[in-house]
Amino acid sequence: MPKFVIQNLDIYYGRIKALKSVTLDVEENRILGVIGPAGSGKTSFLRTLNRLNDLLPDFHVEGRILLDGEDIYHPKMEPVLLRRRVGMVFALPVPLPMSIYDNLVYGPRLTGIRQPSRLDEIVEKSLQAAFLWDEVKDRLNSSALRLSGGQQQRLCLARVLALNPEVILLDEPCSGLDPISTSKIEEALTVLKSDVTVILVTNNTMQASRVADRTAFFLMGELIETGRTDKIFTHPDDPRTNEYITGRFG
């Protein structure tokens, strides 16, 4: 069974229709790359998967989004619990103004975990998974704000991982990072997909070609094409996909 099943999804901000009849399966333990020019609906799509758009005025959806067969917009679905299962990393890293260690245990403490040894284990495991442990293990009590931009972004990834999510959503996580930091995040995602499902929105088509198992191309609120990444980038079915990938627009 796919992790997400999206059926005839329409997204509205007031009278503005941001996404139009999107139907898509997201395979479990795979990386789905989401590409398309600015304004194509990529971020709206991503934020709908853990109901962050609920916080915006005049937002509403039509259609269905199923997570492991459960409708995430059903009245009985608790958004806070959903967001523990479906974590999100944003384009701009926003570490909390506290120590590296406290950034990582903040979420687990809210869920009721108090045992120091268990918290220590969560910190090390999440930093290892984000490829950051070796760089910060000797300064866990120092301010997270003193980390470099690339380290801060990996810390934000580790903070999501500390809650043991089933899905990780990433909205252009490498847009402001240097190539070395970008490669570390890409390597981390490639390893993480054995345990979690990853959905990566990126404006860098080459990044999608490097790390995504499947790729979805959005344009002006429509899902134009989805399929295996190697096929999307070599023999796409829609000429608009080829034009975007080859840089003719976007």
Image (spheres, helix red, strand yellow):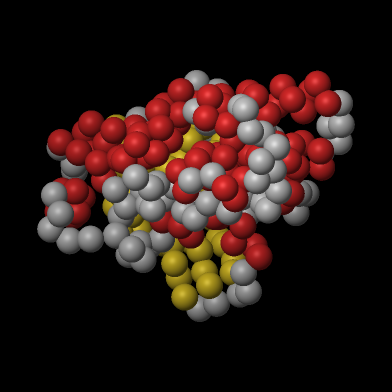
Q: Position of residue 230 (x, y in %)?
A: 23, 31
- Count of numbered circles in the view: 0
Q: Is residue 58 above or below residue 219?
A: below
Identity of the residue furthest to the bottom in this view: 15
The x and y percentages for residue 120 are 74, 25
Between 240 and 55, the one lying in front of the other is 55
Whether residue 91 is situated above or below residue 191 in the rendered picture: below
Seen at 50% across and 63% down, the residue is: 11
Q: Quadrant of residue 228?
A: top left
Q: Position of residue 121 (x, y in %)?
A: 72, 22
Question: In the figure, 203 relative to 164: above or below?
Answer: below
Q: Residue at x 59, y 61 (%)?
A: 53
Task: Tell me if residue 168 comes above or below residue 45 in the rendering.
Answer: above
Q: Is residue 170 visible?
A: no
Instruction: In this rendered view, identify the residue nearer to me: 237 or 152.
Output: 152
- Residue depicted at x 23% and y 60%: 250
Quadrant of the rendered structure where residue 115 is?
top right
Q: Is residue 99 left or right of residue 154?
A: right
Q: Residue 242: x percent and y percent?
A: 15, 48
> Is residue 140 visible in the rendered structure shown here?
yes
